[in-house]
Amino acid sequence: MKNVAVIGAGTMGNGIAHTFAQCDFNVNLIDISAAALEKGIGTITRNLDRMVSKGKITENDKTATLNNITTYTELTEGVASAELVIEAATENVDLKLNIFKTLDQACNVDTILATNTSSISITQIAAVTSRPEKVIGMHFMNPVPIMKLVEIIRGYNTSDEVTETIMTMSQALKKVPVEVNDYPGFVANRILMPMLNESIETLYNGVAGVEEIDTVMKLGMAHPMGPLQLADFIGLDVCLSILNVMHEGFKNAKYAPCPLLVNMVRAGKLGVKSGEGFYDYSESKKAEKVAKQFNG
């Protein structure tokens, strides 16, 4: 299996494409937006340049990786020769179901269909196809080229053969695959999201401020990043979407999103991607930080 298609050129999609291409797979990166594809390739190029500057890869490695990626704005054209398709679109149930209905019609009958969903049921996604045994979850962690973990999620009908194939392929990517079963949030987000939500509740209830909460978790629990900063990095809209899926799936109040999180998303304060979340990531703030460093 050498031909892979990745749907979505955003943060996760371009990271997945980068990872496969660097391991010498032929990658078709697909997005309906030509601008998103251009931005995605730009991100991959910058990340490769950073690896070259650190001596992790050579210029020839960078060139070979980029040459392994072909971009498409037409989904059916991009997946025509794929042996594996990985969907990395927005975390929206209806969108993903529509994509998989199209993939089922457009792809070869032997093509494995994977989703990078972080919380949505693999079984539900597989049910809209005629090949549920060939549908599986591949939940990569962000940033994909660096993070080792891949959650491999079996749907109710996912075959042993497909699971073994994807586990082996993940190892070929120099990742550590962990097989889990199909329940809301899987393992990573079932544990992580309630922690992030409780951190937001702690702020909402006035127990402590943003930096104080993050400092307690970094110094007291040896977390490399505080939970509120991590939520900003993930995207507050993504956190809200995952919590909503888990709340609906488990019918349990403990997964209900904090009102502060809901309001911040409504206000467009999504974290790093929007320039502001629990922290300020605006250009003016960056300039202020540089000035302080320059002035000692």
Image: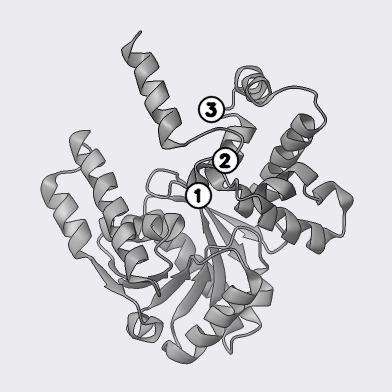
Residue positioned 68% across, 53% down in the render = 266
Q: Position of residue 125 (x, y in %)?
A: 63, 76
Mark 1 highlights which residue?
Answer: 141
For marks 3 and 1, the one nearer the N-term is 1
Q: Secondary structure at mark 1?
A: loop
Badge number at residue 159: none
Mark 2 to mark 3 CA distance (whole Å): 14 Å
Callout 3: SS: loop
Quadrant position of the C terminus in the picture: top left
Q: Amino acid at mark 2?
A: Asp
In the drawing, does residue 34 fall left or right of residue 162? left
Sequence-earlier tag: 2 or 3: 3
Figure check: 192 above or below 4: above
Real-space Cα separation, disc 3 to disc 1, in angstroms = 15 Å
Q: Residue at x 56, y 32 (%)?
A: 279
Visual colour scheme: one colour
Q: Is residue 16 left or right of residue 237?
A: left
| Residue holding disc 2 | 232
* Point 45% across, 56% down: residue: 12
Per the rendering, the mark at residue 224 is 3
Which residue type does callout 1 highlight?
Met
**Which structural element holds mark 2?**
helix
Q: Amino acid at mark 3?
A: Pro
Q: Residues within 10 Å of mark 1 (few under 14, many from 20)?
A: some
Residue 283, how many percent across, how many down? 41, 36
Q: Nearer the viewer, residue 284 or 6?
A: 284
Residue sitting nearer the eye, 116 or 95: 95
